[in-house]
Amino acid sequence: MPAVDAELLDAYSRTVSSVADRVGPSVLRIDAHPGRRQGRRPGGGSGSGFAITPDGFVVTNSHVVRGAARLEATLSDGSRGAATLVGDDPDTDLAVVRLTSPGIAAAEVGRSSALRVGHIVVAIGNPYGFHCTVTAGVVSALGRSLRTESGHLVDDGIQTDAALNPGNSGGPLVNARGQVVGVNTAAILGAQGLAFAIGIDTAIQVVSVLIREGRVRRSVLGISAQNVPLPRRLARFHAIAGESAVRVASVEPGSPAARAGLREGDLIVALGSHPVNGIDDLHRLLTGERAGQVASIVVLRGHERRELEITPAAR
């Protein structure tokens, strides 16, 4: 092997090892023990999680903890302790639990919006109960739509070829700098190198609300959508400062979006007086308080700018 190739492989190995050493202590296994009245066998399932604060707040997937009568956490050093559910949001498949005996190191959080296809990422978790397993790969695609176990479509997901298996759910997807950029949530069983994570930008918004209120109240438009670049010529012509918009991929029949006249292919650039540069902006703006309140929504349809009236519905 040429010396240059060996040096590159060594550099890659050092990167993955450094990330594992840095983030591994923040990752834990979560065992969810259901009550017998649910008709499920004792022992339940298990998944992963990672600490985001030094006082024991841990991010995981909603499907890992939902319905559990008791939660138990196992840290990277093998110590065990009880955990309590702070809140969960099935719509985004995210949840927050808190360790009753804090002391776990908090992982550093990055920005999923800074990811690009081809970036190296590392997944850390507990597949099939094998504690602190590390896999590495690249970002295969961005802006994927994921359907959670609740049936809700989560937009702007991260696709990666870092291997994920049952038990990885809720663990961190980490960039080469050791920053968490996603929450691992799904793998397509039987497929090779096809796994998904929720972007950390979306996750932090949801987690912040769960820590404050224990649940997320939302209003909805009734669309599926994806982030797309905004053509510069179009942005200049309509004096839009943003560089991206939300493209309507589909409209649910009878939804607020359908009643407002939104169409597939429309580019949403504003809701009310707030600019919309991406799906995260819509998620942040569509709070429970907006349900039933008429708002203006600005879209670009072809080369035209249109302002429609929409009344978000409560979820």
Image (spheres, rainbow, N blue to C red):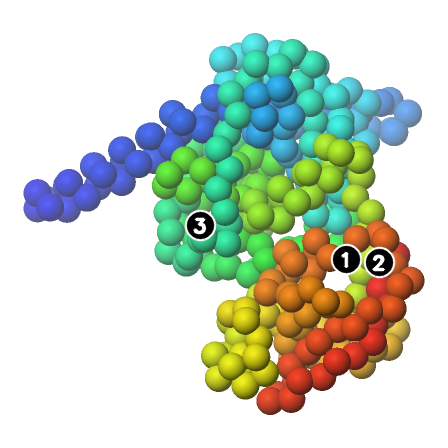
Q: Are marks 1 and 2 in contact (CB under 8 Å)?
A: yes
Q: Quadrant of residue 223?
A: bottom right
Residue denoted by label 3: 161
Crowd band around label 2 with a 10 angstrom C-alpha radius: few (<14), some (14–19), many (20+): some
Instruction: Please indicate, yes or no, whether residue 156 appears anywhere in the rendered image.
Output: yes
Q: Residues within 10 Å of mark 3 (few under 14, many from 20)?
A: many
Cα distance between the residues tagged 3 and 1: 32 Å
Please tell me whether mark 2 sits on a helix, a strand or a loop: helix
Res. 237 image quadrant: bottom right
Which residue does the image show at 75% across and 80% down from the upper left?
Answer: 307
Of the image marks 2 and 3, the number of the one nearer the N terminus: 3
Q: Looking at this view, is 299 or 187 the one in front?
A: 299
Position of residue 267 measured from the top left corner of the image (x, y, whole percent): 64, 76
Residue type at numbered disc 1: Leu
* Image side of residue 134 versus residue 227, left or right: left
User: What is the spatial separation of the Cα atoms under label 1 and label 2, in whole angstroms?
Assistant: 6 Å
| Camera-side mark, 3 or 1 | 1
> Identity of the amino acid at label 3?
Asp
In three-dimensional space, the C-alpha distance between marks 2 and 3, rounded to whole angstroms, equals: 38 Å
- Furthest toward the left, the residue is 3
Residue on which the image places disc 1:
286
Secondary structure at badge 1 equals loop
Where is 249 relative to 180, above or below?
below
Q: Tag 2: residue type?
A: Arg
- Mark nearer the N terminus (3 vs 1): 3
Query: Which residue is under mark 2?
Result: 290
Counting from the top left corner in percent of width and height, residue 103 is at 57, 14
* Placement of 189 over or under 300, stated as above or below: above
Image point (33%, 30%), residue name: 17
**Residue at position x 82%, y 47% from top?**
217
